[in-house]
Amino acid sequence: MTSDCSARRRRAPCAVVAALALAMLLGACGASSKPTPSSAHVTKETCRQLEAVLSDGPEPAADPIGYAQAQILPLRQIHTTDAKLAEAIDTLASAYQGFSSSDGARSAKSAVSSASRAIDTICPAATS
């Protein structure tokens, strides 16, 4: 009986250690799987920011140059992890910069229209 009893005593700490190790392993797995915002959610939030920026400033029809100037800095301050949307925002900001610098030249106006369409493809009606 003594040998049977001592074998049980050795197994008990091993079982406790194994249970603790398993609990730590499962806890580590759970901690690393925090939900991250989906790319669709990030894009939607960026689109909201974009709409807010583009709705501010002078009336585009009444003061196209002033409107373009008012958009450049706020557009450059929008950051997103969506590479396609980030490029479209940068292109629109650059187009507004060109429009403003050229005093509304036809080619610059065309660049703004093209950049606006690219934005609207990702964020429908954002530039309207």
Image (cartoon, grey):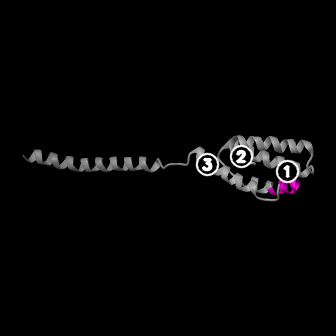
Mark 2 = which residue? Answer: 125
Which structural element holds mark 2? loop
Disc 3: which residue: 42
- Where is residue 55 drawn, in percent x and y? 75, 56
Q: Residue at 80% of width from left, 40% of height from top?
A: 114
Asked if the residue at tag 2 contacts the one at tag 1, i.e. Cβ–Cβ closer than 8 Å, the answer is no
Q: Nearer the viewer, residue 30 or 120?
A: 120
The picture places residue 11, in percent across and down from the top left corner, at 20, 46
x and y percentages locating residue 109 in the rendered image: 87, 45
Give the SS element for disc 1. helix
Tell me the amino acid under the disc marked 2. Answer: Ala
Residue 78 visible in the displayed image: no
What residue sits 20% from the left and 48% below the top? 10
Farthest-out residue, left = 1
**Which badge, 2 or 3, comes first in the chain's sequence?**
3
Alpha carbons under labels 3 and 1: distance apart: 26 Å
Q: Residues within 10 Å of mark 2 (few under 14, many from 20)?
A: few
Residue occupying image coordinates x 39% and y 50%: 27
User: Is residue 101 in sight in this rendering?
Assistant: yes
Residue nearest the observer in this picture, 126 or 69: 126
Majority secondary structure in the magenta region? helix
Q: Is residue 4 left or right of residue 35?
A: left
> In this rendering, is residue 104 above or below 118?
below
Q: In this figure, which residue is indicated by the disc labeled 1? A: 97
In the image, the segment drawn in magenta is 60-70
Please tell me whether residue 58 belongs to the stretch shown in magenta: no
Relative to residue 68, is residue 111 depicted above or below? above
Determine the image quadrant of residue 83: top right
Residue 44 badge: none
In primary-sequence order, the first of circles 1 and 2 is 1
Picture coordinates of residue 68 (x, y %)?
Answer: 84, 53
